[in-house]
Image (cartoon, coloured by chain):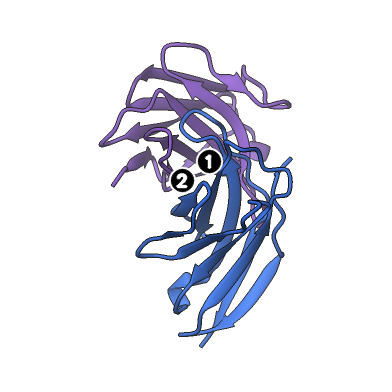
Amino acid sequence: GAVVSQHPSWVICKSGTSVKIECRSLDFQATTMFWYRQFPKQSLMLMATSNEGSKATYEQGVEKDKFLINHASLTLSTLTVTSAHPEDSSFYICSAARGEGYGYTFGSGTRLTVV
Amino acid sequence: DAKTTQPNSMESNEEEPVHLPCNHSTISGTDYIHWYRQLPSQGPEYVIHGLTSNVNNRMASLAIAEDRKSSTLILHRATLRDAAVYYCILSLGRDDKIIFGKGTRLHILP
């Protein structure tokens, strides 16, 4: 089945530093990937749509200069949280779809803690 | 906003069937109905999806109303490992973004 690998699974960083999260589709190509954020006891919130070879599309209220997304190949999208602050601490999840008519596959998530 | 409505929580006894309802009265003709579930501290897991006809797989069954304005996810024999938040989502598939609602938190009683 379709597999999406997300790395790292958890990271602790100091306030003001940047953190990069990788999302890879292991056995299929994904022209589009999605990035979500989830706070404790809440649902997933879509942050942006990552498009291979072009700029990401951000949801309203998401700062594109703070959450940098790069989709450099058909199997890799990265999310960089720049100048992280404690309020950026959250569970970040990526997903991709193999094709029309298929379901979406999600990464296992990255728990970011900013201290 | 999410285009589906689900009960906040449900309870079921272990080894009994579970029927999780979802209303999607504004569904369009090309929207697929997707179900995902999320265990604590994990990414969502695909359960099943369908367009018009009922669907079965090794995890569950999806019953879709004739007018497609509602659907029901059926777990035939619940186990403790099925305790999770279940999300019903509409999507065109592939490049179409999916918006999560609050889902249904399913509790399984031993």
The chain letter of the purple chain reads A
**SS type, badge 1:** strand
Estimate the spatial distance between the alpha carbons at disc 1 and disc 2, rounded to whole Å.
Answer: 5 Å
Lower sequence index among marks 1 and 2: 1
Q: Which residue is depicted at the point 49% across and 53% down? A: B53
CB-based contact (under 8 Å), mark 1 and mark 2: yes
Badge 2 is on which residue?
A109
Q: Do labels 1 and 2 share a chain?
A: yes
The percent coordinates of residue B24 (x first, y second) are 69, 50
Q: Residue furthest top?
A: A54
Q: In which quarter of the image is residue A85?
A: top right
Q: Which residue is depicted at the point 62% across and 17% down? A: A65
Badge 1 is on which residue?
A92
Chain name for mark 2: A
Q: Which residue lies furthest to the bottom in this view?
A: B110
- Residue A39 position (above or below residue B21): above
> Hey, what amino acid is under mark 1?
Tyr
Chain name for mark 1: A
- Residue B100 position (above or below residue B41): above
Q: Which residue is depicted at the point 42% across and 17% down? A: A52
